[in-house]
Image: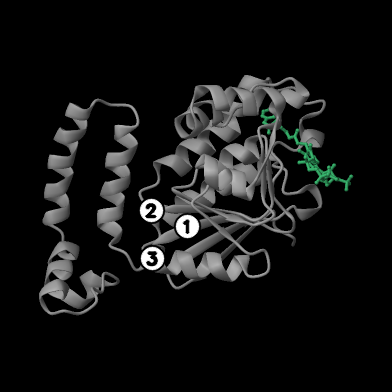
Amino acid sequence: MNSVLLVSDQNGVRTLTMNRPDKLNAANDELLLGLTQALQDAETDPSVRVIVLTGEGRGFCAGQDLGDVAGRDTTFTEHLNHTYNPLIRTLRGLSKPVITAVNGIAAGAGASLALAGDIRLWSESAKFIQIFSNIALIPDSGSTWMLPRLVGYHRAFELMAFAERVDAEQALALGLCEHIFSDGSFRQDVQAYAERLAQRPAHALTLTKQALNAALTQSLSASLDLEAELQQQAGDHPEHREGVSAFREKRAANFVNLENRLV
Ligand code: LHQ
């Protein structure tokens, strides 16, 4: 069977690959619901330390499959509440780091998905389009929340109003991605990056995500209180002891399988 979502594991990295390459991985319900479930599965699987989301072929994701919505009896609101919104809430709510590996064009809700990772790695030929206004819709799947936080209100509005095509160099300058890798070695470079991230202290990164996400919507004072609380949790964890021991012993810290090694 040709699955719309491919799942593979390597060295603590779970890669989820959207697999509708003939349609630039435009999303149908099967893909959206399957992806949400796969993210939940990755969250609860203790062997997974980092999640990579990418696309097969020359597209990352071209947003909603427009052939799939024609003639539906569900409303736009129902469709978003049933598929995209649970997906984005699940992705952004994960305790584990998510890398969106944008291998090609990301358009519409696919652009929203590209932004939703904790780290965004782009291939040199990737493109980003807030394409919704071309079909007289508004940006959804979190773009109206995320994009102005990255580029400011005014640039976000301009990108949305003209469905401007953003290439990788522009994306880097705008803060839409952290790194650009060559097309030819993209998958290997992403895997190597993800494996490096998987070696980092997973518990501390979870708490870091929690603090950063809360900070996006709260005051400095509330963030200071949260840091004080979460720092206690980090300091009480075996990872912290390992980090300090490694520093004293002048060796590299080993944060992987720490619980197994301590018992
Ligand atoms: C597609 C698609 C696609 C189906 C390429 N659907 N086939 C939420 C809630 C409810 C409803 C509506 O939407 C939403 C959220 C959204 O995401 S709205 C935005 C929906 N997406 C779009 O409007 C993008 C439509 N696609 C395009 O404008 C172009 O394909 C882009 C600019 C992405 C890429 O252009 P090209 O590189 O020139 O590729 P292409 O157009 O030749 O596409 C390749 C194939 O993929 C082609 O099929 P074909 O059989 O002719 O080779 C396209 O029809 C198909 N495809 N996007 N969204």
User: Comparing marks 3 and 2, which lies closer to the viewer?
Assistant: 3
Mark 1 touching mark 2, by CB under 8 A? yes
**Does 68 sit above or below residue 19?**
above
Q: Residue visible at 30% across and 51% down?
A: 206
**Does 163 sit above or below residue 247?**
above
Q: Tag 3, which secondary structure?
A: helix
Res. 51 mark = 1
Of the image marks 1 and 3, the number of the one nearer the N terminus: 1
Percent of width and height locating residue 105: 70, 47
Answer few, some or many: residues within 10 Å of disc 3's Cα (few below 14, many 20 plus, some between 14 and 19): many
Mark 1 touching mark 3, by CB under 8 A? no
Quote the CA–CA distance across marks 3 and 2.
10 Å
| Residue tagged 3 | 198
Left or right side of 69 for 122: left
Res. 96 mark = 2
Residue type at mark 1: give it: Ile
